[in-house]
Image (spheres, rainbow, N blue to C red):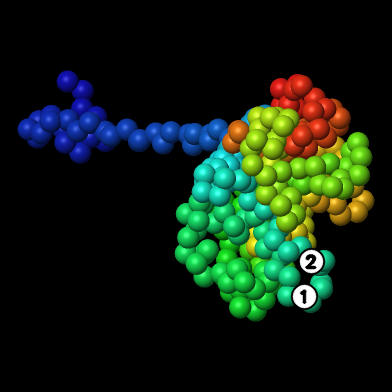
Amino acid sequence: MDTNPSDPYPPDAGHSRMIRPKLMQVPKRQRCSAMTLLEVLVVMATVAFLVALLLPAVQSARESARRLGCANNMRSIGCALYGHLLVRRAFPVGCLEWKSPGVSSTKRCLSWNAIILPWLEEQATFDRLDYQKPFDDPANATVAATAIPVFACPSADRRGRPVGGLGGTDYGGVVGERITSVNNPEKGVIVNEKSYAPREVADGLSKTILVAECAAEIWPDGQWINGRNLFDQAYSINAKLSFWEDEMRSRHPTGAQCLAGDGSVHLLSEMVDKAILAAACTRAKGESPAAPWATQ
């Protein structure tokens, strides 16, 4: 057997031949995969497109929930009006002892809202008011500043903020209309200084509006204790005006909600015929055989 002179352990030394170790081969560094700028832009565009599709649906769902909350408020107000009706045999007076804004007077100018508080589970608030004094008398200031949730439309987003230092309301009594003629005497049901029984609503309770939204902006008379939170309708629903007018106007995108004399609540479309709307704001003129919500 040939002997390798370079082998330190020849066979005759009784040792096994040493296997020379091979050098370990280090694998080449693997290349990390990353997104290119084009791929990032495509992903961003896709996400933006999906958000654009979903956002209107989310906003629509939120507005539907707010509108439902508003309708529930008006149903509660309707129940309170009927509570007053059962006890007093008539709907409440819209305003007791009306007075002009900014006039110092002993006239009380108390609202229908304040009168129905016991039927809205606000007996404690009712008991704290001094009904023998004006709504803006200092004796009533603290309690009149109370925010009452049932008078706030969720879409108006008041968050309990006061109006002129007093608790606000987004719902006003409808004293009549000025679309077809002057509203004197007042043609509605919730009016100044007078209360009406159901038998006096000759047009029919289911076709007559008692209360409606006035919530497009914070209106100066939009205080639940203030007897001036009444209005007569002169324009279309949600009319865009360059001046302030107490009207059926809301933050709902397609109309404003109203409470009919039978306790039902309806969303009045911005497109409703003004003549039919006028008829629904009166109690006994017999102008229309159908309510505006029946023609939408």
Does residue 215 appear anywhere in the picture? no
**Looking at the picture, how far across and down is residue 295, in whole percent?**
75, 21
Q: Secondary structure at mark 2?
A: loop
The residue beneath circle 1 is: 105
In this orientation, which residue lies closer to the viewer: 206 or 241?
206
Residue 244 falls in which quadrant of the image?
bottom right
126 shown above or below 156: below
What quarter of the picture does the C terminus occupy?
top right
Q: Secondary structure at mark 1?
A: loop
195 shown above or below 24: below
Whichever of labels 2 and 1 marks the residue nearer the N terminus, that label is 2
Q: Amino acid at mark 1?
A: Ser
Q: Amino acid at mark 2?
A: Lys
Does residue 295 appear anywhere in the picture? yes
Tell me the residue at 81%/32% (across/down): 285
258 shown above or below 122: above
The residue beneath circle 2 is: 99
Measured in 3D between alpha carbons, the distance from the residue under mark 2 to the one under mark 1, in whole angstroms, is 7 Å
